[in-house]
Amino acid sequence: MPYLLIRTNREVDPPEQPALLKKCSTHVAEALGKPERFVMVSLETGARMIFAAEEGACAYLELKSIGLPGDRTTELSDGLCRLIGNELSIPQERIYI
């Protein structure tokens, strides 16, 4: 089962969270070629975080799945950084996977 954890110091309004979770679920399923019914996504907002010794907007992502294709790491990382960066207005260089 693919699992994506998103932890960020950004606040996401509760009514907007389901749509973000769905976008992420769909993205992971398509990127990994797995049925979406097996994808799990967790979102933790408002976390106390700093990155590179700065308190600005940042996010930590963790993607786990049996058989993650190592040769596609860059492609998967880029796609997730773009998605989270665009959805949460976080510069991609402030997202750690």
Image (cartoon, rainbow, N blue to C red):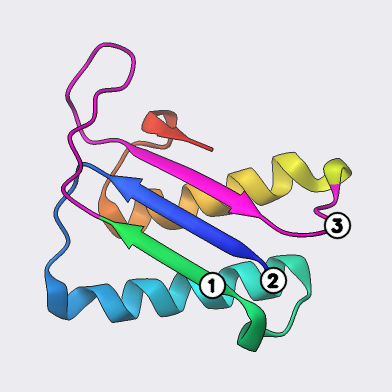
Position in image of residue 1 (x %, y %) = 69, 71
- Measured in 3D between alpha carbons, the distance from the residue under mark 2 to the one under mark 3, in whole angstroms, is 10 Å
What is the span of residues highlighted in magenta in the rendered image? Answer: 45-69
Residue beneath disc 1:
40
Q: Which three-letter amino acid code belongs to the residue tagged 1?
A: Met
Given the current orientation, which residue lies at the most extreme bottom position?
A: 37
Q: Quick one: label 2 or label 3, which is nearer the N terminus?
A: 2
Q: x%, y% of residue 44?
A: 29, 55
| Residue linked to disc 3 | 67
Which residue is the site of mark 2?
A: 1
Q: Is residue 55 left or right of residue 65?
A: left
Q: Residues within 10 Å of mark 1 (few under 14, many from 20)?
A: some
Q: Is residue 8 left or right of residue 41?
A: left
- The mark nearer the N terminus, 1 or 2, is 2
Residue 4 x, y percent position in the rendering: 53, 59
Q: Is mark 1 in CB contact (under 8 Å) with mark 2?
A: yes
Residue visible at 60% across and 75% down in the picture: 39
The answer to whether the residue labelled 1 contacts the one labelled 3, judged by CB atoms less than 8 Å apart, is: no
Asked which secondary structure carries label 2, the reply is loop
Report, in whole angstroms, how far the alpha carbon at label 1 lies from the one at label 2. 7 Å
